[in-house]
Image (cartoon, helix red, strand yellow):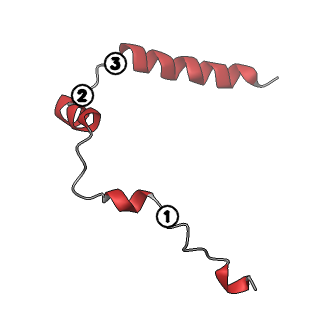
Amino acid sequence: MGRGRAKAKQTKVARELKYSSHNTDFEALQRELSGEADSTRRSDDRYDDPSDDDYDDYRR
């Protein structure tokens, strides 16, 4: 029980996505797909240094 309300909401969202017109920024999409880096994001920020471990202080 209780599935009816959730299903109705999912149906409403699906219809909105299907029939509404969205303003698509094709230039931003092209930049993302071509792999150009965003000026605010550095590539080395994505990966943590494995030697930088928070538990090093507790190991003996």
Vertical placement of residue 3 versus 44, above or below: above
Q: Is residue 22 left or right of residue 51?
A: left
Pair 3/2: label in front: 2
> What is the three-letter code of the residue carrying label 1?
Asp
**Residue at the spot 46% in from the left edge and 59% down from the top edge:** 47
Residue 20 is tagged as 3
Number of numbered callouts drawn? 3
Residue under pointer 1:
48
**Residue at the spot 55% in from the left edge and 72% down from the top edge:** 51
**Residue at the spot 33% in from the left edge and 56% down from the top edge:** 43
Residue 46, image x, y percentages: 42, 57
Q: Which badge, 3 or 1, comes first in the chain's sequence?
A: 3
Residue 24 is tagged as 2
Q: Is residue 43 left or right of residue 5?
A: left
Residue 31 is tagged as none
> What is the three-letter code of the residue carrying label 2?
Thr
Q: Secondary structure at mark 1?
A: loop
Pointer 3 and pointer 1: residues touching (CB < 8 Å)?
Answer: no
Q: Residue 30 is drawn in which quadrant?
A: top left
> What is the three-letter code of the residue carrying label 3?
Ser
Vertical placement of residue 46 versus 25, above or below: below
Residue 11, image x, y percentages: 56, 17
